[in-house]
């Protein structure tokens, strides 16, 4: 059965159509345009009489391409490190309720056997499918990171990559979509060359690198920076001389895209504006970096083996010296970007869907356009999520 989404404020890569029309057939978008011309008085709408088309009237709502989350640890009490199909299914449902239609679950620093168990769970979720946001692959955050910039990552598991570990990761390169690592850690350049040549996004993160390390990292295949300003070095002085860090390198090198945790806590609006001014909308991606308490009440939770406190809409280290991940969904972040940062719907769609689709090499996702997968999020006029459609099927909302 075909699906038509009519009357909503519809956000395409090129414009916002005030009263839009989208037709979906077999999970794919087959028409997009103004309702007045795309079937408003024509055959498109009359076809419903035959029962072959389901029509959803969303006048007064906003229709955007589904959010793609490059980096999400958990939600609904579940975590990627639980390494089970059920945990990934729970995460996919909680984040679908937040407007995410595709996601890359993320690990934390842990022994190799535990990381590989999560890789296998993600492979199972990809094979069997989940009920919410589609699982695209896995993001390995750590363990090849800087102790000085570890944040909530556990110090005892942080290490240098061994030849055996690199071989094991290469064997799973089809599942691994991204690796966050610190370029200054010995052995990471070898890993970057192996993985980037196999299409894995190599991202600088939890790193104390200088701009000179980043320069070499670009040559080794790094193209991205993870959660800019969190776990990132900045200018430091050594014997009176100043050394730019990861933050300055991210601004300096056009070859680096970045992602940001736009939960309204990790980055104040002015820093988000500074990032956008320097990198441009096309190089900035929104991630949730959400941990298992996303969609759950405040309290004590685990991030890896470490205890964290969830309070005031964010996760904290127990001593409250730093944040330990977000508890927000992509939908909550879109709301922050629209309301608090003042971005347009087109800009938000680029940062939450179009750019991450490009980064992950997903030609069939990231825009409301003919030929793309019907991954759609429908927002109420207060920017809360009304419904989420994953590949043509309602994963969240009144019609689910
Ligand atoms: Zn992190
Ligand atoms: Zn993370």
Image (cartoon, rainbow, N blue to C red):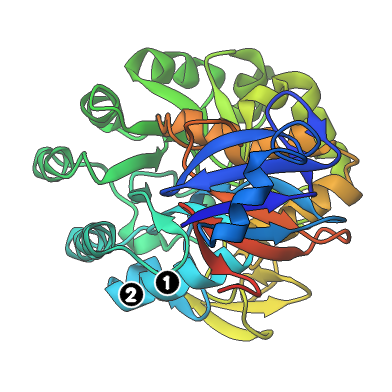
| Residue at 79% across, 50% down | 62
The residue carrying mark 2 is: 82
> Does 233 sit above or below residue 76?
above
Residue 372 x/y as whole percent: 48, 35
Circle 2: element type:
helix
Nearer-the-camera pick, 390 or 8: 8
Looking at the image, residue 84 sits to the left or right of residue 315; the answer is left
Nearer-the-camera pick, 136 or 168: 136
* Circle 1 residues within 10 Å: few <14, some 14–19, many ≥20: many
Q: Is residue 260 visible?
A: no
| Residue at 34% across, 69% down | 81
* Circle 2 residues within 10 Å: few <14, some 14–19, many ≥20: some
Mark 1 to mark 2 CA distance (whole Å): 5 Å
| Residue at 65% across, 34% down | 32
> Does 294 sit above or below residue 357?
below
Decide if ligand 2 comes within 8 Å of the CB at mark 2: no
Residue 29 x/y as whole percent: 52, 39
Which quadrant of the figure contains the C terminus?
Answer: bottom right
Circle 1: element type:
strand
Residue 251 x/y as whole percent: 67, 20
Q: Mark 1 and mark 2 in contact? Answer it, CB < 8 Å.
A: yes
Q: Is residue 388 visible?
A: yes
> Does 27 sit above or below residue 314?
above
Nearer-the-camera pick, 218 or 376: 376
The residue carrying mark 1 is: 79
| Residue at 23% across, 66% down | 114
Residue 140 x/y as whole percent: 35, 49
Q: Quadrant of residue 330?
A: bottom right
Q: Quadrant of residue 328?
A: bottom right
How many callouts does the rendering have? 2
Looking at the image, residue 67 sits to the left or right of residue 162; the answer is right
């Amino acid at each position: 059965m075909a699906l038509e989404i009519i009357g909503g404020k519809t956000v395409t890569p090129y414009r916002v159509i005030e009263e839009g029309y989208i037709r979906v057939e077999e999970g794919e978008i087959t028409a997009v345009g103004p309702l007045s011309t795309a079937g408003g008085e024509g055959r498109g709408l009359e076809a419903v009489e035959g029962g072959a088309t389901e029509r959803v009237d969303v006048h007064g709502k906003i229709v955007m391409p589904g959010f793609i989350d490059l980096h999400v640890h958990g939600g609904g009490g579940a975590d990627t490190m639980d390494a089970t199909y059920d945990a990934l299914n729970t995460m996919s449902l909680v984040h679908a309720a937040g407007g995410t239609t595709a996601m890359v679950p993320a690990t934390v620093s842990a022994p190799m056997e535990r990381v590989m168990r999560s890789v296998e769970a993600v492979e199972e979720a990809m094979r069997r499918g989940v009920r919410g946001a589609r699982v695209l692959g896995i993001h390995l955050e750590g363990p090849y990171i800087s102790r000085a910039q570890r944040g909530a990552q556990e110090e005892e598991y942080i290490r240098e990559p061994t030849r055996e570990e690199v071989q094991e990761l290469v064997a799973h390169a089809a599942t691994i979509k991204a690796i966050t690592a610190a370029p200054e850690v010995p052995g990471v350049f070898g890993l970057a060359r192996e993985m980037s040549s196999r299409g894995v996004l190599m991202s600088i993160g939890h790193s104390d690198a200088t701009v000179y390390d980043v320069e070499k990292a670009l040559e080794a295949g790094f193209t991205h920076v993870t959660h800019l300003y969190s776990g990132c070095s900045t200018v430091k002085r050594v014997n009176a001389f100043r050394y730019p860090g990861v933050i300055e390198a991210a601004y300096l090198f056009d070859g680096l895209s970045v992602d940001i945790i736009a939960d309204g806590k990790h980055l104040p609006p002015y820093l988000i504006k500074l990032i956008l001014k320097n990198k441009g909308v096309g190089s900035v991606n929104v991630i949730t970096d959400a941990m298992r308490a996303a969609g759950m009440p405040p309290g004590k939770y685990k991030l890896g083996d470490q205890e964290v406190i969830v309070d005031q809409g964010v996760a904290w280290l127990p001593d409250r010296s730093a944040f330990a991940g977000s508890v927000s969904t992509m939908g909550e972040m879109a709301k922050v970007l629209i309301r608090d940062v003042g971005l347009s719907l087109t800009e938000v769609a680029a940062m939450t869907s179009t750019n991450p689709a490009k980064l992950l090499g997903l030609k069939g996702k990231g825009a409301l356009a003919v030929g793309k997968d019907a991954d759609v999020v429908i927002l109420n006029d207060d920017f809360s999520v009304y419904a989420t459609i994953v590949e043509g099927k309602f994963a969240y909302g009144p019609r689910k």
